[in-house]
């Protein structure tokens, strides 16, 4: 397994790093459908533009600031870039300049890009890169990871990230909208599970004024789980798909069960039938007009890594909007990663569609 995929090196979007369980490259049995660059292909030289089809005039010059040559994050950067290219092919209103930059030279490369005429920047990808660039931001810049609390605020620095806490909070609100009043949180003590649990608990307390009961699954007898579930009117499963499939049959059959996209797989276990979950339109709504107009990856990726590809698509589309609007707060996008709008601290919030796992689908 690539070292950048481990939780200990979670510098790219945390959600992807912690969930991925396979290399970035091809998945057997799936054929290419697009012409996006494979993750293992050589990266472009610094400041090499991606030519727009035809001779259409462009109004923007977008800098794609990614660690394309990094041993740790190079493959992640290549997948994001491929997503940007797919969006550019569908909406060629701008020139895209690929700029290789890591945490050590990101600030210098950023200043050089802006001096060369870049109007909008996508990136950096790592938190360290964002911290290095933040003091120098003078054009709309869309970071692709969370901005640390120690980073000075900048009115031109925006964020689009795949954040697990956002999904957990949406599940808490969804339960409230569904009329649930006493949900049980089931977690397993792992880092990602703990983050989901805490985000859900905080949002539930904010919405209802009450604490949600919690149980930590550590492989103990299912009777403990059954006892706790008997006093709840819904369950939030903050565990991996395999563990969720083990626990779900022990719950009362009529008890509503919810989960985030953490539970998503290409072939759900039949034991998970009936679970309500949220995920990207990229996966749940592939035939929606706002989704199907963008090419799928040329190299079949793991489910989790493909999220970086979708992130690249929406990053490019938001960059177009950031470069042409005088009021970023008005930006709304029917994105492939969710319905996007600008929220607090210039972070683009994602609202995900809800789906139901059926028998064998």
Image (spheres, helix red, strand yellow):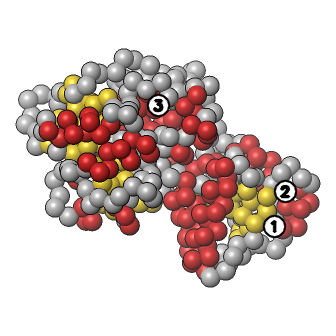
Q: Is 312 placed left or right of 195 in the picture?
A: left
Earlier residue among tags 1 and 2? 1
Query: 202 or 183, which lies in front?
Result: 202
What is the spatial separation of the Cα atoms under label 3 and label 1, in whole angstroms?
41 Å
Q: Which residue is mark 1?
A: 229
Q: Is residue 321 above or below residue 67?
A: below
Residue 326 position within the rendered picture, expressed as x and y whole percent measured from the top left: 16, 61
What is the spatial separation of the Cα atoms under label 2 and label 3, in whole angstroms?
40 Å
Give the class, few, some or many, for how many residues have Cα within 10 Å of label 1's Cα (few <14, many ≥20). many
Q: Which residue is mark 2?
A: 250
Query: In which quadrant of the rendered image does the C terminus lie?
Result: top right
Quarter of the view holding residue 208: bottom right
Q: Residue farthest to the bottom?
A: 209
Residue 303 position within the rendered picture, expressed as x and y whole percent measured from the top left: 55, 36
What is the spatial separation of the Cα atoms under label 1 and label 2, in whole angstroms?
9 Å
Q: Helix or strand or loop: what does disc 3 sit on?
A: loop
Q: Which residue is mark 3?
A: 73
Q: Is residue 19 above or below residue 217?
A: above
């Amino acid at each position: 397994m690539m070292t950048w995929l481990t939780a200990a090196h979670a510098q790219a979007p945390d959600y992807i790093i912690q969930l991925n369980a396979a290399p970035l490259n091809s998945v057997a049995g799936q054929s290419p459908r697009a012409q996006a660059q494979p993750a293992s292909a050589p990266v472009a030289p610094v400041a090499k533009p991606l030519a727009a089809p035809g001779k259409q005039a462009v109004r923007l010059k977008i800098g794609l600031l990614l660690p394309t040559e990094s041993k740790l994050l190079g493959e992640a950067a290549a997948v994001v870039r491929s997503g940007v290219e797919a969006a550019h092919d569908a909406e060629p209103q701008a020139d895209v300049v690929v700029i290789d930059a890591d945490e050590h030279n990101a600030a210098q490369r950023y200043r050089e890009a802006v001096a060369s005429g870049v109007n909008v920047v996508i990136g950096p990808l790592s938190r360290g890169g964002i911290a290095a660039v933040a003091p120098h931001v003078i054009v709309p810049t869309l970071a692709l990871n969370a901005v640390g609390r120690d980073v000075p605020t900048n009115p031109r620095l925006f964020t689009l990230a795949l954040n697990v806490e956002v999904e957990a909070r949406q599940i808490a609100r969804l339960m409230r909208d569904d009329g649930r009043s006493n949900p049980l949180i089931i977690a397993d003590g792992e880092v990602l599970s703990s983050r989901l649990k805490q985000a859900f608990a905080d949002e539930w307390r904010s919405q209802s004024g009450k604490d949600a009961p919690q149980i930590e699954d550590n492989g103990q007898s299912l009777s403990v789980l059954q006892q706790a579930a008997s006093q709840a009117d819904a369950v939030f499963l903050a565990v991996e798909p395999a563990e969720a499939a083990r626990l779900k049959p022990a719950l009362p059959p009529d008890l509503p069960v919810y989960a985030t996209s953490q539970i998503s797989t290409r072939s759900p276990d039949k034991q998970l039938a009936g679970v309500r979950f949220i995920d990207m339109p990229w996966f749940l709504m592939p035939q929606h007009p706002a989704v199907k107009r963008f090419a799928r990856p040329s190299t079949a990726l793991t489910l989790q890594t493909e999220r970086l590809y979708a992130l690249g698509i929406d990053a490019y589309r938001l960059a177009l909007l950031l470069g042409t609007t005088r009021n970023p707060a008005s930006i709304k996008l029917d994105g492939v990663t969710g319905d996007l709008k600008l929220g607090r601290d210039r972070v683009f919030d994602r609202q995900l569609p809800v789906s139901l796992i059926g028998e064998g689908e």
